[in-house]
Image: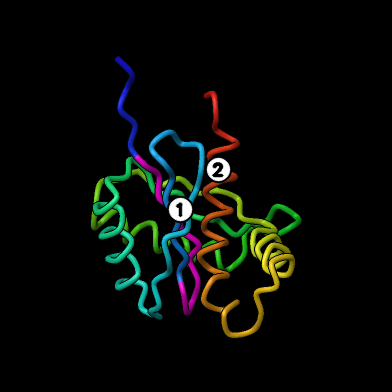
């Protein structure tokens, strides 16, 4: 009998909005599920945990902002702080995943699909989370 898999939750943390995506049960495809709109890191962490439980995820994958030269900047400290909050709220493991160029890739996709202005703001964070999660799954497939 095949092993029953659980989902992964992808997170693109931002100051105003935090995009979310979830994997299918096979770990093949990432699907955007929306975003959390809150400037409060504690509220965002609580909502991430709520989504993680709702989707019965085995792991949270959060985009980690590494500079192009490989160094960590102030955004990385914010992510580390969010990960610490998640650790206080649940026991679901969290993996950091290099998110370099994710937002740029999302903008290319939105340009190609002619999504403009106001609509773009509502989908960019979700799409970024979806790209982070898809790249993570692609990088870890077969391991």
Instruction: Give me the residue at 66% from left, 79% from top.
Output: 116
x, y (%) of residue 45? 32, 65
Instruction: Give me the residue at 28% from left, 58% from top.
Output: 49
The segment highlighted magenta reads 7-17
The dot on residue 59 is none
Residue at the extreme bottom: 118
Q: Earlier in the sequence, mark 2 or mark 1?
A: 1
On whether residue 8 falls in the magenta region, the answer is yes
The dot on residue 10 is 1
Q: Residues within 10 Å of mark 2 (few under 14, many from 20)?
A: many
x, y (%) of residue 29? 51, 43
Name the side, left or right, on which 142 lies relative to 24. right
Q: Quadrant of the N terminus?
A: top left
| SS at badge 1 | strand
- Between residue 29 and residue 86, name the one nearer to us: 29
- Given contact means CB atoms under 8 Å apart, are the residues at marks 2 and 1 in contact? yes
| SS at badge 2 | helix
The correct choice, above or below, for 14 with respect to 92 in the image is below
Name the side, left or right, on which 61 lies relative to 97. left
Instruction: Give me the residue at 47% from left, 52% from top.
Output: 31
Cα gap from disc 2 to disc 1, whole angstroms: 9 Å
x, y (%) of residue 101? 70, 59
Instruction: Give me the residue at 62% from left, 65% from top.
Output: 73
x, y (%) of residue 2? 33, 18
The correct choice, above or below, for 96 with respect to 122 in the image is above
Which secondary structure type mostly characterizes the magenta part of the structure? Answer: strand
- Between residue 141 and residue 116, name the one nearer to us: 116
On whether residue 10 falls in the magenta region, the answer is yes
Look at mark 2 in the image and give the residue it sits on: 136
Residue at the extreme front: 113
- Between residue 63 and residue 84, name the one nearer to us: 63
Q: Quadrant of residue 58?
A: top left
């Amino acid at each position: 009998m095949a092993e029953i898999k659980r989902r992964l939750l992808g997170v693109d943390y931002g100051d105003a909005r935090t995009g979310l995506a979830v994997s299918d049960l096979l770990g093949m495809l990432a699907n955007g599920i929306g975003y959390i709109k809150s400037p409060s890191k504690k509220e965002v962490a609580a909502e991430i945990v709520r989504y993680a439980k709702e989707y019965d995820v085995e792991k949270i994958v959060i985009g980690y902002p590494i500079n192009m030269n490989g160094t960590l900047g102030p955004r990385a400290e914010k992510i580390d702080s969010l990960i610490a909050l998640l650790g206080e709220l649940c026991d679901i493991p969290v993996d950091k995943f290099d998110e370099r160029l994710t937002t740029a890739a999302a903008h290319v996709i939105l340009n190609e699909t002619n999504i403009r202005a106001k609509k773009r703001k509502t989908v960019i964070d979700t799409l970024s989370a979806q790209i982070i999660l898809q790249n993570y799954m692609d990088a870890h497939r077969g391991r």
